[in-house]
Image: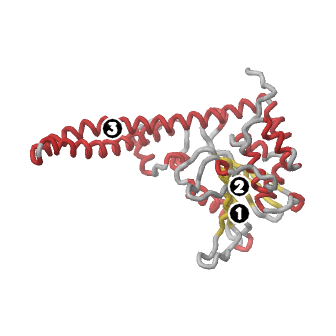
Amino acid sequence: MEKVTDNFIMLPTVDFCFKELMQNDKVRKGFIAAVLGKDPEEIQETTLLPASLKQDYSDDKLGILDVAVLLEDGAQLDLEMQVLNFAYWTNRILFYLSKMYAGQLKKGEPYEKLKKCIHVSILDFIHYAEDKRCYHKILFCDMKTGVPYTDLMELHILELKKLPKKDQAEDGIIRWMRFFNGKKKEDFREMAKTDPYIEEAYSELEKLSSDERKRLEYEAREKAVRDYNSLMGGELRRGRQLGIEQGLKEGIEQGIKQGIKQGREQGIKQGIKQGIEQGIERGIEQGRRALVIQMLENGMSPGDIMSAAGVSEDEIKAAQKENKHL
């Protein structure tokens, strides 16, 4: 086993590390207070709720790790660190926020028991390409007046890659985003001096980083993300290459046929162009199918595959039908 060095520090952008940090009551309280725009002393109690893990991260399968929290007033928060730019991310978080909200009621209970539900997405990728702001708070409102319809459901989107240059006066949510986006030990050490709750987070980060068992779990999550990125990139490149090869072949054949009617040279050029376009499209479809099959073989659930690869339920069923062992 590799010995942990003094310079090694876990990164909060790895969801395993983020989830472990949120097990600390003081860290959790400090971050939630920043999300809610409150002083941490106003947060009386935060209770961790069971959060379902869709896959077992310890054996290198890609699962979704999140943190579910219950506040003293009954409000619930779902905190999620996300580094992979999943297709249909917007649809996904709306689904989970709605499920969290509706899941509060048992059969026969009145609607008045429903409490506020908040989903916090900490993203290590660009979600709003046309907007320079790194933090968005979203709720239902009247489109004309901007007056909120209700505060019972909220979305908070934190885009780490859009963090502006450091400002001496920054605090609250931006300061926490800066901490989560840290890349080396010196970064975290400096930020710890700015806030007692972030200081606690840095202390917890050091403890986690010196725990060899936790480090193995952390590295397993890193490997799962790297493997997923490699798989996605490889399958898309393979699909595109297959499409180009098939397109050239079909394009030449189609071009020759068209050339007989329209003039050989012009027909071949047009046919090759059309064939390449059609071939690339078919190749990408083949690549998507191969990607779905690989994900199923790796143990990913249909729901996660639909979110990650942007494929439909019918495509997944078709892949399962072709490969009956899945």
Residue denoted by label 3 = 244
Q: Position of residue 248 (x, y in %)?
A: 27, 37
Question: Badge 1: how crowded within 10 Å, few (<14), some, or many (20+)?
Answer: many
Q: Nearer the viewer, residue 203 or 221?
A: 203
Of circles 2 and 3, which is in front?
3
Where residue 235 appears, x then y in whole percent?
Answer: 45, 36
The answer to whether the residue labelled 1 contacts the one labelled 2, judged by CB atoms less than 8 Å apart, is: yes
Place residue 128 in its image quadrant: bottom right
What residue is at 41 percent from the left and 37 percent from the top?
Answer: 323
Which secondary structure, mark 3? Answer: helix
Q: Are marks 2 and 3 in contact (CB under 8 Å)?
A: no
Q: Of residues 91 and 51, which is closer to you in this image?
A: 91
Instruction: State how far apart marks 1 and 2 are (Cα).
Output: 8 Å
Name the amino acid type tagged 1.
Answer: Cys
Q: Quadrant of the N terminus?
A: top right
Q: Position of residue 165 (x, y in %)?
A: 71, 50
Q: Compute the Cα span from label 3 to label 1.
A: 48 Å
Looking at the rendered structure, the number of numbered marks drawn on it comes to 3
Tag 3 and tag 1, C-beta contact below 8 Å: no
The residue where tag 2 is placed is: 78
* Relative vertical location of residue 5 with respect to residue 104 in this rendering, above or below: above
At label 3, the amino acid type is: Ile
Residue 262, above or below 184: below
- Which of marks 3 and 2 precedes in the sequence? 2
In this rendering, the label closer to the viewer, 3 or 1: 3
For disc 1, the marked residue is: 117
Amino acid found under the numbered disc labelled 2 = Asp
